[in-house]
Image (cartoon, grey):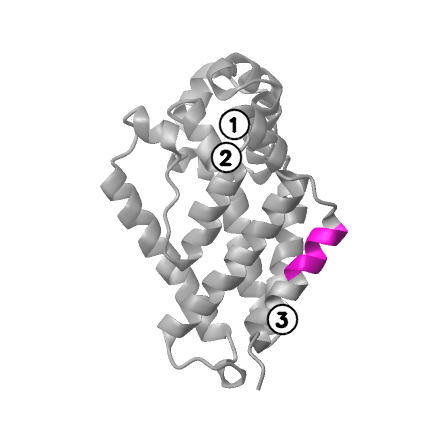
Amino acid sequence: MPTERFYHLPEEKKRMIREAAVKEFCRVPLDKASINKIVQNADISRGSFYTYFRDKEDVLEYIFEDVISQVQNFCIEFLTQEKGEFWRFPKALLEYTIHICENNKMFVLSQVALGNRTMMQLLQRKIGGMMGGPFCPKKILEKGKKDPAVCLEQYRDKADLTLQRLYQLTDCSKLKINDFEDFQELFSLCILNMIMTIGEIYQKGVEKEVAVKSFDKRIRFIKYGAAKG
């Protein structure tokens, strides 16, 4: 992840660096990406780059982390604005996640930089991480940049805090749940539905409108059940 020096940069400078990196990672696979092109497009020196990041894998992790942080903030803001109304939340989260990923070229980035299945894996690890899963890109772990045990603990702690916050914001009086563990299970079903829908659109080529209708149907089953009587 970036150094403290990076986080102290003006927002415009951080945006330029992020966009320069995304542009390069969308151009070629990660192992062929050029740090020189990133620093040229971001209008910074190579020396400055290494005061912000360890390497290009570090930049890639930051890009995904930044998007997921925005998604997590959206979850908190939405439930706050909706006064804890849960059943409006899954559809809004799906739409926001698709929007922010498309806007930040995350689907293109995942396909070019790390391979065709990467976005689904990252969604499962990190957005799914809001229900207890980690985010540690395999290639970064393989290069010895991170200790897997430390990574797991770090992201589980962060995930627990996010999910606890969502639980506190949700009006559980309208849900058949008794405690946080029940909420976690309900939330996980909605997240898995979202990941399935995004996979249908961006991996299987299903029309977005069709995939969203299937998403809505699955949410109705989650909400009302499928048993008669």
Within the image, what quadrant is residue 12 found in? Answer: top right
Q: Which mark is residue 115?
A: 1
Q: Is residue 120 above or below residue 38?
A: below
Across and down, in percent, residue 204 comes to 64, 40
The numbered disc on residue 118 is: 2
User: Which quadrant does the N terminus fall into?
Assistant: top left
Nearer the viewer's eye, disc 3 or disc 2? 3
119 and 224: which is toward the camera: 224
Which secondary structure lies at badge 1? loop
Residue at 53% in and 38% down: 119
Q: From the image, which quarter does the C terminus lie in? A: bottom right
Location of residue 210 in the rendering, given as x and y in whole percent from the top left corner: 74, 53
Task: State how many labels appear.
Answer: 3
- The residue identified by callout 3 is 220
Label pair 1/2, CB-CB below 8 angstroms? yes
Residue type pointed to by label 1: Gly
Q: Amino acid at mark 2?
A: Thr
Question: Could you tell me which residue is drawn at 57 percent across and 51 percent down?
Answer: 196
Q: Which residues are magenta?
A: 209-215
Q: Position of residue 170 (x, y in %)?
A: 51, 75
Query: Which residue is pictured at 55% across the width and 19% down the height?
Result: 38
- Which secondary structure is most common in the magenta stretch? helix
Q: Gap in Å between the C-alphas at discs 1 and 2?
A: 6 Å
The residue lying at 37 percent from left, 32 percent from top is: 138
Nearer-N-terminus badge (3/1): 1
Q: Nearer the viewer, residue 133 or 67?
A: 133
